[in-house]
Image (cartoon, helix red, strand yellow):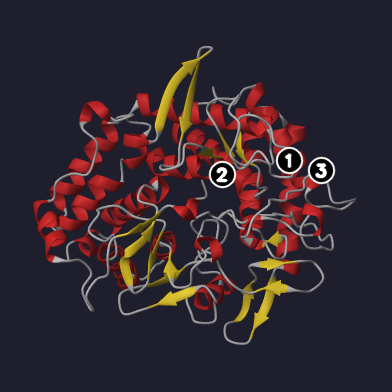
Amino acid sequence: MKRSTFIQQAGLLTAGMFINKTVLAAIDERVTQRPALGKRNFTSTAVEDAIKQFKAKVSNKELAWMFENCFPNTLDTTIFYSVTDGKPDTYVITGDIDAMWLRDSSAQLWPYLTFIKKDKKLQQMVAGVINRQMQCVLKDPYANAFYKDATKVSEWKTDRTDMKPGIHERKWEIDSLCYPLRLSYHYWKNTGDVQPFDEHWKNGVKLILSTFKEQQRKTGKGSYHFQRVTNTPTDTLPMGGYGFPIKPTGLICSMFRPSDDATIYPFLIPSNFFAVVSLKQSAEMMQVLKESQLATELQSLATEVEQAIQKHGVVNHPYAGKIYAFEVDGFGNANMMDDANIPSLLALPYLEAVSTSDPIYQNTRRFVLSEHNPYFYKSQLAEGIGGPHVSRDGMIWPLSIISRGLTSTDEQEIKHCIQMLQATHAGKGFIHESFNKDNPADFTRNWFAWANTIFGEFLWKTFQQNPQLLNS
């Protein structure tokens, strides 16, 4: 089922109020929204200790309640851990959809990496995700989401592309291949453990590299094409399923955005930035693994894409000056916007793609958080970025508010982001995919684990660096 169909209508709010008296009473009781201990899919002692520490020291009880609900949500509800052929194997659903996105599964586990040194069980579970992800990549590097059951046939089986059993959806997105590399690299950095990075993993990296090169489209359109019979234009590709034309520049084509919406111009700049970071990280790992030739090839592509971004991905905007474009085509055309999902232009420092002090990034940030971004929405309740995925104007994605907070160096801006998130969860104690800027009780996706967990990551980072911001 399409993500945006999970829409929760909880009734209109009176003007100027975020939640009604019944909801306020429920919050006052602060009953945990977590599953009972015996019904949780996975438990980490290190994460539980962090929750206890946060609750004990944060005086804002609603935030403490939300942190307890949200931060362990991935572990509580979406993890399916096992051992297969002597290796850890972890399947991770997104929440309300029983499928494993390469992007979401990586992002859902990301906030726990700092705890894996303290928790061997947690470390093994993350290693299992790495193993499962490379299994998925080797099955089809162009697919974005997979099933645990390799024989299961998707509801999207009629898509006009090379669908195989075990694949939920086959939308080609650069970030789908970057996220597993990011998870692998930082797992290694946090543990020093190289056990997951065997020949199976190396073969996955080689396939990622060749896929990226194919999608530079220097000698043709490549093997990937996609069309869907749909009334939603962003769910299919034009021009025989190959997307709109490009002129080869060294950049990599991404036919879909991380929101799973089709690109307009296939050179998606935030995802190309992400590819540069991931390729460099993989090159560093390959040197350690004594794969010097592969390391050289990875670094060479990273350098080529990085140079192409600076040559073709920087434009002059009449409001913000020199900024990074969202999408370009190599012919000189650019799509000037930002989407809420990560990677986004706003989230580039979060992905270690640019420094927050980069003047072009600062100009870009000013643009995407302004009315000049067609998907920036603002009301008396909140402001943030949405996108066409939900198919309605005025739907803010909390991911954009969280990205803004995670990449801010301004305490007042961080505090503002926290206050908006606290004010717009509609009394549920969880973070949603999107909400109506004028009515947070009108939201999509009641159970979206990535949004919950990254919200917990944002609060935990603030707790570590600026705890006073949590005690308002």
Q: CA distance from mark 3 to mark 1?
A: 15 Å
Q: Quadrant of residue 333?
A: bottom right
Within-10-Å neighbours for mark 2: few <14, some 14–19, many 20+: many
Mark 2 touches mark 3? (CB < 8 Å)? no
Please tell me whether mark 2 sits on a helix, a strand or a loop: helix
- Horizontally, residue 146 falls left or right of residue 447, namely right
Q: CA distance from mark 2 to mark 3?
A: 22 Å
- Horizontally, residue 30 falls left or right of residue 207, namely left
Q: Position of residue 371 (x, y in %)?
A: 50, 82
The reply to whether residue 192 is visible in this rendering is no
Q: CA distance from mark 2 to mark 1?
A: 14 Å
Q: Residue at x 78, y 63 (%)?
A: 244
Extreme-right residue of the structure = 219
Mark nearer the N terminus (2 vs 1): 2
Give the residue at mark 3. Answer: 223
Q: Is residue 355 above or below residue 132?
A: below
Please tell me whether mark 3 sits on a helix, a strand or a loop: loop
Instruction: Give amino acid for label 1.
Output: Leu
Mark nearer the N terminus (2 vs 3): 2
Please tell me whether mark 1 sits on a helix, a strand or a loop: helix
Instruction: Give amino acid for label 3.
Output: Ser
Q: Residue at x 71, y 50 (%)?
A: 302
Q: Quadrant of residue 364?
A: bottom right
Q: Residue at x 80, y 67 (%)?
A: 330
Give the residue at mark 1. Answer: 209
Nearer mark to the viewer, of 3 and 1: 3
Mark 2 touches mark 1? (CB < 8 Å)? no
Give the residue at mark 2. Answer: 179
Q: Position of residue 284 (x, y in %)?
A: 63, 39
Mark nearer the N terminus (3 vs 1): 1
Q: Is residue 97 above or below residue 356?
A: above
Instruction: Give amino acid for label 2.
Output: Tyr
